[in-house]
Image (cartoon, rainbow, N blue to C red):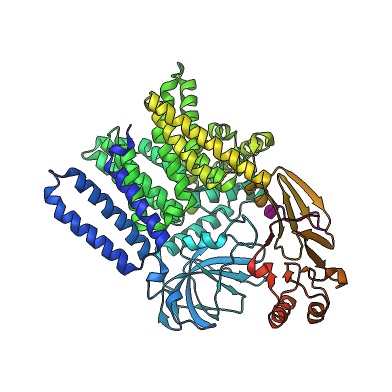
Amino acid sequence: MRPFQFISVKLALCLITGILIGKFIELPIFYSSLILISTLAVLVLIYPKSRRKILSFGITSSLTTIALGIFIIANVNPKNSSLHYINQKNKKTQLWHLKIDDVLKPNSYSNRYIAKIMSLNHKRTRGKLLINISKDSTTNTLFIDDEIITFVNIKEINKPLNPYQFNYASYMNELGISHKIQLNKEGFIKHKHESKSLKGIAAIIRNKIIDKLKNENFGSEELNIIKALLLGQRNDIDPDTLAAYKNAGAMHILALSGLHIGVLLLLLQFILKPLERLPKGKTIKLIVIVFLLWGFAFLAGFSDSLIRAVTMFTFVAYAIYLNRPTSSFNILALSLFFILLIKPNLLFSVGLQMSYAAVFSIVLFNPIFLKMWKPKTWLSNKIWQLMVVSISAQLGVLPISLYYFHQFPSLFFISNLLIIPFLGLILGVGVLVIILALLNSLPSVVASWYNTVIYLMNSIIKWVASKESFVFEAISFDRPQLILSYSLLFLLLLFLTKRNFKNSVSLLTCILLFQGWTIYSNYKSLTKEEFLVLHKNNNTILLHKLGKQLSILSNNKNANQKIIMDYLIAERMDTILHKPLKNNYIYKKNRLSIIDSIGIYTTEFQNSTILLIQSPKTNLERLIEDINPKMILADGSNYKNVVADWKKTCSKKKIPFHHTGEKGYYVFNQIDD
């Protein structure tokens, strides 16, 4: 198959190019509109002559699609909307009318929600905010479509304060959310006349289903898995169970996405096959399937991942209806084009990237791998087909998985081999269980049997995950490796399709480039040395990187492992040493001196960079006069009000001041201890 023979593929690639350009340059809506209108005008002028000038028409069409990508990403940019709250003349504290749009997984301290802005100071306003409501025993849970009124100031979502930490602010920004509100139960009032949305109605039905299922004979862990599999609710799953699915390479089973919709599509194709005997039966069957797929998406909450998956498989269902062997790739590219046309920011969603990478990889590699071996028996043939699908999908998502998650569960094919064949049965029976539970007609024997099936699935996943030696973690994988690995996959596809000298040389060249970059990155890490002061609440953590060795300087042996592992993986290190804090370190012939809660300092600290930890009870003005420090550092172990006073004092004395809780971690280039 030659993917680029399809116009839909070319259009999708041009649209993606335009979205990337628009995201990078952030043109105002006027200029992006002007570019689009200009290219459209040229396209209209060329169209009558397109038969004679096919090349010029193709180039103009491509440029027009790129311009369309630039326009649609500019159109969703909050800076280009006069109604968006960031473009309003904002005071510190304002009156917000908000409507809950989504309920997020709570953390240890807060219930979390995404809210649409209905009005700001009684004026119609657009935008979304992240809401954190402090937990206590009397906090009432909010639901989708609940409306609240609050008088509060907004804050930017915190950016990462430590190196290579997950950038939650950037993640939320891709969803169109850049600010948050912190509330307690007294900080808002509920609006009594809230309107109902489709998403809110689905949430009411979903909560009713969950209440019905709670009255049946399901174990708590099994019920949480059922809620995830059938209703898209993963918030209540035990962290250990989630970790087991992750380590077994089976997280896709819990996340309602393309896999589930694909399985449902195949199941519906089989169940509704008798409809084909009717006049216009195939058309009726297609309409019913599309209706049921979107009905399932409605029931499960219309999340972005589900809308994306159902849109994609609606096009796939149409491709099956057309019954053309080469149309699947064409239809997939069309679905991607229309999804990005409606929601261009989804291009930067990891979920979309992984979904389409997996499906495109299956479409491209699966036929090639199936030709390599044709088993003689029916059972071995089915096992081989399933393994090939799993391997093809894993090939597509592996670079993304390594880049974002730095982990590879090598036993993924065992999880898929043991679970995927029965996923259709699990989903089909699950839908039946929900219908019977709603009708109060669920037989206890069916509930008990289904509970046992889910229990067995969990047991299999946990057994696979227990083989820790087959889970490769802490894999360093950067952006150039991501790009090179997809180039490698593309060239591998060309080589497997047509094994000639040119394709062989291209593939080998790409392998050498990948290896060369990996060797260069390891060499850079080996020759690099730096010293960092990290940010951690109620703790002091210093890191000293020397080649492949990382020294953790902290009096707390249980220093935050996630922060350290992020740094360890990104910097390609393999040795960790724990050392207690010292009072002094020498870097670049300059001294770093630490003053702790006791507040003692000596004349040796003269002209040092001072690190204040554990809120020392010392007069900072006198300290500055006594030792004349070059700079004052304060980490997360200090009280915020004390840090605020220090900041004022340093500003008054014109001494540089760095608080890790505000500016993030601090880096020294070289250390000699």
Q: Nearer the viewer, residue 64 or 460?
A: 64
Q: Nearer the viewer, residue 400 or 144?
A: 400
Q: Position of residue 173 (x, y in %)?
A: 49, 63
Looking at the image, residue 93 lies above or below residue 287 = below
Q: Position of residue 548 (x, y in %)?
A: 71, 44
Horizontal side of residue 349 vs 2, given as left or right = right
Q: Nearer the viewer, residue 304 or 469?
A: 469
* Location of the C terminus (image quadrant): bottom right
Q: Main secondary structure of the magenta part?
A: loop
- Count of all numbered marks drawn on residues in the image: 0
- Corner quadrant of residue 605: bottom right
Q: Nearer the viewer, residue 340 or 317?
A: 340
Looking at the image, residue 368 lies above or below residue 249 = above
Tell me which residue sits at (36%, 38%) in the image: 269
Horizontal side of residue 431 vs 562, given as left or right = left
Tell me which residue sits at (65%, 48%) in the image: 571
* Location of the N terminus (image quadrant): top left
Residue 150 within the magenta-colored segment of the rendering: no
Q: Position of residue 564 (x, y in %)?
A: 70, 52
Most distant residue in the top direction: 376
Start and end of the magenta stretch? 554-564
Q: Position of residue 53 (x, y in %)?
A: 15, 45
Horizontal side of residue 583 vs 248, given as left or right = right
Q: Is residue 289 visible?
A: no
Q: Is residue 11 visible?
A: yes
